Image (tube, rainbow, N blue to C red):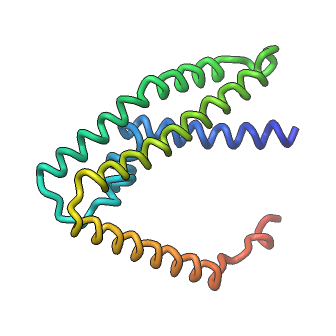
Amino acid sequence: MRKSITLSLILSAVLGVSSLAFAQGGLGFGPGPHGHHGGAEMAFRGLNLTDAQKTQIKTIMQQSFASLKSQGQAVRQQREAFEALSPNASNYQSAAASLAQAEANFTSARITARAAVTAQIYNTVLTSAQQSQYASNKAAFQARKAQWQQFKATHPLPSKAGSAQ
């Protein structure tokens, strides 16, 4: 019972996240919730890109999204078919396992595509000065992230065990 509940919760979270990615227009490159940018756009912010470079980056990202679009649509159709099934259907568990595998494959493809896009932009679009700025921006981000993790470790949230009665 716990395994199926855990699987259901994980599957729901994955489905929600992948649905949000498609609602945003793809691979997490576009505007996110509340107007924030994620993915490659955030990584290349502050590099004083020329209009030509911005156009090249946009083209590379659009090509990457187009290459994954059919796989994403197939996963979405599989998800809709699974959601239409009744929990007492004979193939419910196998459909869940199949959907989980399809979601995992699609997530892997998206991560690999994002890495390929970043590498392509870094190697073909950015100048050497922009590449060194990118590296220093990344190092500064990692330092801020480590500082935040250290702060969270030294200032834990209060426990809510007493109010759960």
**Residue in the image at 65% along x and 21% along y:** 82
Side (left or right) of 127 relative to 72: left
Side (left or right) of 84 relative to 123: right
Task: Using the rendered image of the protein, determine whether residue 78 is visible from the camera's viewpoint.
Answer: yes
Task: Using the rendered image of the protein, determine whether residue 34 is visible from the camera's viewpoint.
Answer: no
Q: Taking 71 as reference, is 150 above or below it?
A: below
Q: Residue furthest top?
A: 90
Q: Position of residue 131 (x, y in %)?
A: 28, 65
| Quadrant of image for the C terminus | bottom right
Callout count: 0
**Residue 21 lies in what quarter of the image?**
top left
**Residue in the image at 78% along x and 24% along y:** 93
Q: Position of residue 80 (x, y in %)?
A: 58, 21
Q: Residue furthest right?
A: 1
Q: Position of residue 30 (x, y in %)?
A: 33, 46
Q: Position of residue 118 (x, y in %)?
A: 37, 51
| Quadrant of image for the N terminus | top right
**Residue 89 lies in what quarter of the image?**
top right
**Residue in the image at 35% along x and 29% along y:** 66
**Residue in the image at 17% along x and 45% along y:** 55
Q: Taking 115 as reference, is 81 above or below it?
A: above
Side (left or right) of 93 relative to 126: right
Q: Residue furthest bottom?
A: 154
Q: Taking 27 as reference, is 158 above or below it?
A: below
